[in-house]
Image: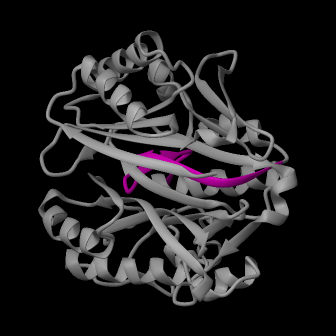
Amino acid sequence: MKRFFSKFDFNQLEFHQIKSLIEEQNNQTKYILLKITIFIHSNNLKEFLEDSKNIYHYICNYIDNYNILTIIIPQSPSENKNISVEFEFIDSNYELCLNKYYTNHKLVQIVEIDSAIYQEKITAFNPFYYKLLEQYSIYNLLELQLKMHSERIITRIWNFIGKITDFTTLDGIKTQNYQLLNDARYTLYKKYKITKYPASTGIGMDFFPLITIIQSNPGKYKDKVYYLSNKSQKEAYNYSASKLISENIDKYPPLFSRGLLLKDGETSQLYISGTSSIIGEDSIAENNYKLSATATLKNIDQVGDLNEIAIFLNSKPDEMIVNNKFVRTYVKQNEGVSETIKTVKNYYPESVCNFTITDICRTELLVEIEVYAEILRKE
């Protein structure tokens, strides 16, 4: 399955701009629009809820392609922009069918890609009903989607966590919000018998307990999936208790793989998890955005090591091409954006890149980067 990405930033987004952008993209490519991800700066929750509801309503009712998966995140775009829009397209040559539907309570939107040679399911919360998210815990919100992927191979998860490094007190016990996700994920993975961990991003946002996006393939894909590691980093699921921020004695590490490769004919899909400047299990380059971004990029290279990937694909490194198609970078503070953008774009000059401002899962970390790439065989 080949994918195509594009990204646009605005100070103010009007509805006709969305429609014209979609029409322009559809006319320029042979790809079908699968997903729109919108990052919005909002001054408060009320403002964000109104904006997200209106945008989602417009996309569903005034754009011909009703099957678009729409995700809206309360996270500020970089470079003093108020709105950033990402488009993800899929190759129309697959003669695929794109079906969108909802759960009974309308809170979760589901899109299924179905063709003779490729199947995929993506779930995300429905922005029209975001107000309901405040009524659920992180555990309940995660389970709402996980149960829809039962007996499937989960390849990629994004967990956007409200005030990720703040603390919540439950039954008199203080726990960091990111650790609440880790504990919920551990319990739910055990419940749904998930023993192989997907590529994942756990990152901050301004409001709500949790916004999750989950991507999976049918169980028959299990032999097509390869879980990647980084020799310079301890596996996240083996982190020591000192890295888990909670007063609770029972606390669990983050269950994800550093990356995941999905073998898909002549084109394999590579998902690099949200990655930071961590060596072993310790943070480095804590006070310098350029050094932090550079260390993070080196970690990403080690996850996407062609020597390791070639073995799984029964190939040789010099017979493959890595096409880094999309790079999303989360930057802790606006003051570090320009240096981070320069560093990342110099490293990925041909890639579509997006940058947002938000807290990372550790207070000392400055940058987190995720990558989607395709591995192609040389002709």
Q: Residue at x 53, y 45 (%)?
A: 170
Q: Residue at x 38, y 17 (%)?
A: 53
Q: Please indicate whether residue 329 sits to the left or right of residue 221 in the image.
A: left
Q: How many marks?
A: 0
Asked if residue 157 is among those painted magenta in the image, a careful observer would answer yes
Q: Please indicate whether residue 304 sits to the left or right of residue 50 in the image.
A: right
* Majority secondary structure in the magenta region: strand
Asked if residue 30 is among those painted magenta in the image, a careful observer would answer no
Position of residue 347 measured from the top left corner of the image (x, y, whole percent):
31, 75
Q: Residue at x 50, y 58 (%)?
A: 201
Of all residues, the one furthest to the front in this rendering is: 379
Is any part of residue 246 visible from this angle?
yes
Is any part of residue 72 visible from this angle?
no
Vertical side of 284 occupied by 195: above or below: above
Q: Quadrant of residue 329?
A: bottom left
Q: Quadrant of residue 106?
A: top right
In this view of the protein, which residue sits in the foreground, 155 or 191?
A: 155
Q: Please indicate whether residue 361 sits to the left or right of residue 254 in the image.
A: left
In this view of the protein, which residue sits in the foreground, 153 or 235?
A: 153
In this view of the protein, which residue sits in the foreground, 181 or 14?
A: 14
Q: Residue at x 28, y 83 (%)?
A: 285
The quadrant of the image that shows the C terminus is bottom right
Q: Which residues are magenta?
A: 152-174
Position of residue 194 measured from the top left corner of the image (x, y, whole percent):
79, 56
Vertical side of 319 occupied by 363: above or below: above
Vertical side of 343 occupied by 194: above or below: above
In this view of the protein, which residue sits in the foreground, 235 or 109?
A: 109
Of all residues, the one furthest to the top in this rendering is: 61
Position of residue 261 measured from the top left corner of the image (x, y, whole percent):
66, 67
Position of residue 132 measured from the top left corner of the image (x, y, whole percent):
50, 21
Vertical side of 258 occupied by 248: above or below: above
